[in-house]
Structures are given as C-alpha cells and as structure tokens.
C-alpha cells in the first residue's frame, strides 16, 4: 500500500481480478453495481447475461437475490464496490435469512468511492464487510488479497453461497462502457434467459 492509499484498500488490479472471476462465464448470470464494477465486467467482455445496474446505488445485492430466487437452477454472481455494498448493507441480512444456494457476491474493496473522486468509505474506517456477512449468517465468507487467493475464489463463487471481499488498489481503471439503455439491457437479459422480453 503506498502513502496515498486509504487504510482498508489493497493492491490488486481490479481489471485482472474481474477478468479472472469472469473467465469462461458460460451461463453465469452476472449483476454489477453502478460505476466501476460495471466497467470492469464490460472490459472482461460484454454479454447478454450481464445485467449492469447503472444507477440505483445499493441495490445490486438485492437484484441478485431476486434473480437467484426467480432462477433457482442458474448461478448468480453479484460484483460490486464497497461503497455500493455499504449503501445497501441490510441486503446481507436479508440474503443470509433467505439462504439462496445459487447466489454469490464479491465486493471489490478499494476503501473508497473511486468513481466520484476517491472519498474514503467506511471500510477505510475499519468496517469489515466479510465479518458483517458472517455475523448475518452467510454460510461462507472470504477475503482475498493476492491473485493466488482470487484464483481460488473464482470457482467457489460459481458453486457456493459465498460472500467474498477482494482488496483492490485504489484508483480508476480506464472506462469501458457497455450499453446504457436500461430497457435494452433488461430485454436482452430476459431474452438470453429464454423469457419473453416484456412480460
Ligand atoms: C444514491 C447515489 N448516491 C451517490 C451516487 C454517486 N456515486 C456513483 S458511483 C459512486 C461510488 C461507488 O463506490 P464503490 O461502490 O466503492 O465503487 P468504486 O468506484 O470505488 O469501485 C457514487 C458515490 C449515486 N450514483 N447514487
Ligand atoms: Mg470502492
């Protein structure tokens, strides 16, 4: 960690982390939080089964829960930021109680709101999101600080109801913008699921 890095951040390259997590995604349903995690998923390869949440900060985990309950035979992976997760912290309790076996969440924790100018989040102040999830009753939690640990997390995130924090470096990666039209994204996603796009 260099002198400018907030406490609670890490050193991993967010693009390398997400590229690893989304390698050969097959039928994985991917929900991303607003801003940087959406760009990361787009940089790894835009696909119809990615559902980007361009706004609605704090809702990524609950969108993931809804999908996991509605599509119990499919795997759902939520990829979001620490600021976004902190805004919807109650979701960790709701998901732990609902116990969907097919939902995993990974938080890219840079201890800051990178997208809006790197203001410190509460993970910089000592909040441990994996410990919060464990206290809520999530069956498995993990924190990764090295790419070797990310490599080990990747298959688990597609097989277990796992809540994982990955400590990434602060700072922005170059923007990689997927489609932004919400109606288009929703229709594309539903069609990829084999559903009527507008039901
Ligand atoms: C309700 C609401 N508040 C604030 C914002 C502004 N905003 C957009 S992205 C973002 C930061 C997100 O931080 P984090 O989830 O940690 O992602 P990072 O960019 O650090 O990866 C903020 C504050 C917003 N879009 N909506
Ligand atoms: Mg952040």
Image (cartoon, rainbow, N blue to C red):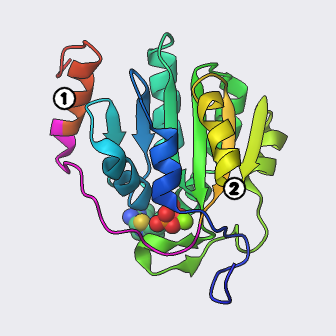
Q: Nearer the viewer, residue 53 or 3?
A: 3
How busy is the neighbourhood of tag 1: few (under 14 within 10 Å), some, or many (20 plus)?
Answer: some
Q: Which label belongs to residue 146?
A: 2
Is residue 192 toward the left or the right of residue 141 in the image?
left
Which residue does the image show at 21% across and 17% down from the upper left?
199
Residue 58 in view of the camera: no
Asked if residue 149 is positioned above or below residue 171 in the image, the reply reads above
Which residue does the image show at 50% across and 59% down from the upper left?
14
- SS for dot 1: helix
Residue placed furthest toward the bottom = 3
Q: Which label belongs to residue 75?
A: none
Residue 169 in view of the camera: yes
Residue 105: image quadrant is top right
Say which residue label 1 marks.
187
Mark toward the start of the polypeptide (2 vs 1): 2
Asked if residue 56 is positioned above or below residue 1 in the image, the reply reads above
Q: Nearer the viewer, residue 103 or 44?
A: 44
Q: Nearer the viewer, residue 64 or 4?
A: 4
Which residue does the image show at 74% across and 50% down from the upper left?
143
Q: Which residues are magenta?
A: 169-184
Q: Position of residue 89 (x, y in %)?
A: 64, 50
Query: Quadrant for ligand 1?
Result: bottom left
Real-space CA distance between mark 2 and mark 1, rounded to the nearest whole angstrom = 37 Å
């Amino acid at each position: 960690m260099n002198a400018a890095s907030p406490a609670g951040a890490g050193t991993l390259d967010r693009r390398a982390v997400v590229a690893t997590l989304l390698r050969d995604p097959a039928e994985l349903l991917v929900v991303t939080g607003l801003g940087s995690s959406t760009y990361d998923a787009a940089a790894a390869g835009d696909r119809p089964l990615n559902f980007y949440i361009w706004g609605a900060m704090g809702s990524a985990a609950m969108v993931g829960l809804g999908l996991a309950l509605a599509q119990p035979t499919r795997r759902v992976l939520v990829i979001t930021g620490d600021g976004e997760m902190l805004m919807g912290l109650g979701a960790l309790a709701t998901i732990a109680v609902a116990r969907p076996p097919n939902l995993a969440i990974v938080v890219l924790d840079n201890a800051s709101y990178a997208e809006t100018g790197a203001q410190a989040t509460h993970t910089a102040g000592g909040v441990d999101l994996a410990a919060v999830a464990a206290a809520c009753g999530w069956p498995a939690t993990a924190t990764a600080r090295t790419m070797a640990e990310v490599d080990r997390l990747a298959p688990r995130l597609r097989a277990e109801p796992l809540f994982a924090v990955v400590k990434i470096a602060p700072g922005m990666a170059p923007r990689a913008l997927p489609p932004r039209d919400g109606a288009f994204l929703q229709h594309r996603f539903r069609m990829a699921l084999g559903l009527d796009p507008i039901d």
